[in-house]
Amino acid sequence: MTKPLIHLSTDTTSLLIKADQRLPEMLYWGKKLPEGTDLESYFHGNHRPVPQARIDSDTVLSLCPEHARGLFTSPGLEGSRQGDNWSPEFSVEEVLQQENSVVFSCRDPRAELKLSVHLKLNPATDVLESRLELTNEGNAPYQLQKLTNTLALPVAAREIQYFQGRWTHEFQTERKILDRGGFTLENRRGRTSHEHFPGMMIGDTGFSETAGSVYGFHLGWSGNHRFHAEAMSDGRRYLQAGELLMPGEMTLAAGECYTTPTLYSTFSSEGLNGISQNFHRHVRSEIVSFPEPGKVRPVHLNTWEGIYFDHDPEYILKMVRASAEIGVERFIIDDGWFRGRNGDNAALGDWYLDTGKYPEGLQPIIDCVKEHGMEFGLWFEPEMISPDSDLYRKHPEWMLHTEGYDQVTIRNQYVLNLQIPEAFDYIAGRLDALLSEYDIRYIKWDMNRELVQPTHQGKAGFHGQVEAYYRLVDFVREKHPLVEIETCSGGGGRVDYEVLRRTHRFWASDCNDALERQAIQRGASYFFPLEITGAHIGAKLCHTTGRQHNSHFRGITALFGHMGVELDPASASEEEKQAFAKYIALHKSFRGLLHTGQHFRCDTDVKETQAWGVVSQNQQEAVLMYSQFKMSEYALAAPVKIPGLNPDTTYKVEVLENSSTDIYMKQCPPWMTETVTMSGALLGQVGLMMPVLQPESSLLIRITGV
Ligand code: DGJ
């Protein structure tokens, strides 16, 4: 043991960890402490008292809470050797500190277990990465039930913002006050899930986009997980997040080790915007790596909602030309191109081009795409197998299932057990063959069902399937390093920082209804920057909601992301096509700002409205979207305070687009029609006057430093 007090810090944050003999414990995490603060004497004379009628000594809420130390809360580690060694007690043996990271090596020699606690506070992004590693040092196997990261929180952190959803309704935010007991969210769906995005914010009561001390958490794992926040009976609080393991799923043989997924955490004293800006910086610098750094994110045309399974190469060529005319830069053929795939009930696994539909192959289409200056992309769903497929007829045993039980279908399909080496090699081989044969620069990698009763070699096979999926993506990336990959899972069902380490964009939702997208994209923006968030202009009549919106509301909404168009441009009306071209051009003119700037959400005082925007890193340029969801309760709107501008800069404010066909106000604020300048301080503190808009419409505003 070297140093009992570890201080990791960034320009704004301090993290203090104590590790005497016992497992390390977070003493403080928050606003930065002044340089040279005498921590040792403070904590020597100011440590936690011991309450009456409880354990007679102090109990440590460590980074892996132990029952053996008298902590009656959810332990960080659960497991046993057929009942033995079920309650280990670790001692720290070594602390290895580097500038911004620390590793605590801990051991329980009786239980023959070694536990390493890894923490790394990134000074540039303010994001803390933490993970635990457990090694079985005994000869008998150790059945691991749970190993999870635990972070202590201040008593003031009483309010939780969490995320829930379903297909076409992802990233919906919910709030909860936690005063006593625990709040647990479990995901048992085998993919990151639409239902329980692995993220949570916990902060002061009433924290908002711009105010309050808040902690943000995200678990980088594309399988089952458990988030648990608890207010203990002594008032202490913590957040626990880790993989959810099924009974018997993880057994460590002698010498084997299990590492938890990485928990990404960050603190902000300036509300949720601070949290998401830290997360965005981290994604940009540490998580996503584009094959060609600096290349602009090309505008997409995805064929799915334009033609679904109805593929006619002559018609697709028309779509290619129409796409080029409106400014599309990447043309992606979605589902329906492979042998026997005429609906969603067959052919997954038969990854051979349907030469009935494409007698000349894909080449003429790819040539045309390239002649028009675009890149070509193709849809795959590699982890699946249809009962009605040649692959299933040949290898029914490759289906992920439990012997003796009927496996359910979801979207008429089964999951391919990628843990079977032959199945893995087959699918890897087919992907490699197609990517080698054609100039495919982009894969839309879909995954349209959950894992149900997945058994591999007699044990629950969730963890193994997720790891095999990662290996498969890694294989493709290694063989075809210039190919970009989109992670899609019936929309936003599989996006997290671990999948984003190997992919470059995520499809946020199968719902292209602009009104729904306003909420979905807002929810996603807490964790993901715009340049990786797939946002498309859909058809006027949205097929998942039946709503209709004009091209302007759809266009403005899709601007804020990695933009695309998902409809049939060849059959669109001239008026619609012109609007698509306009919004694509607008997106391109702002792309640099949108994809490198600082994203913010405004606190709007009128509940039927929302506003978000992006400000350039030098604070000279910003673009703001103000949206009205439904009729306002009041006849007047409230001013919108715009965070992130430089208080000392004078800005010109102008309307760029307005999707309302009319604004029913006798007089609009003058800045909407005249050239007006205002200081960043006034825009930030007093706010910009807003009109009441028509329901389901947006105003796009440009703010430029003068
Ligand atoms: C689900 C995806 O989310 C859609 O965008 C589309 O690719 C379909 N699958 C195709 O089957």
Image (tube, grey):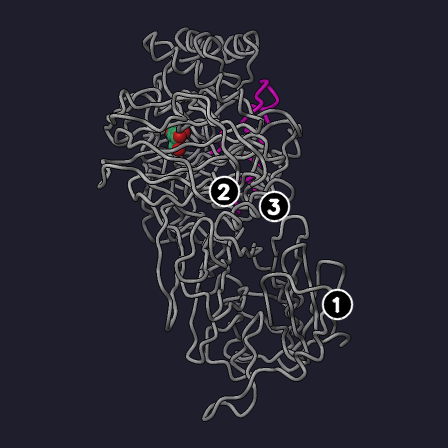
Q: Residue at coordinates 32% horizontally, 25% vertically from top-left? A: 343
Q: Amino acid at mark 3?
A: His
- At mark 3, the secondary structure is helix
Is 146 situated left or right of 605 in this image? right
Q: Earlier in the sequence, mark 3 or mark 2?
A: 3
For disc 3, the marked residue is: 282
Q: Earlier in the sequence, mark 1 or mark 3?
A: 1
Q: x and y percent of residue 341 in the render? A: 37, 24
For disc 1, the marked residue is: 36
Quarter of the image with the N terminus in it = bottom right
Q: Relative to 370, does residue 102 appear above or below in the rendering?
A: below
Q: CA distance from mark 1 to mark 3?
A: 28 Å
> From which residue to which does the magenta span run?
418-445
Q: Residue at coordinates 31% horizontally, 28% vertically from top-left? A: 697
Q: CA distance from mark 1 to mark 2?
A: 32 Å
- Quadrant of ligand 1: it is top left
* Label 3: how many Cα within 10 Å (few below 14, some 14–19, many 20+): many
Q: Is residue 304 visible?
A: no
- At mark 2, the secondary structure is loop
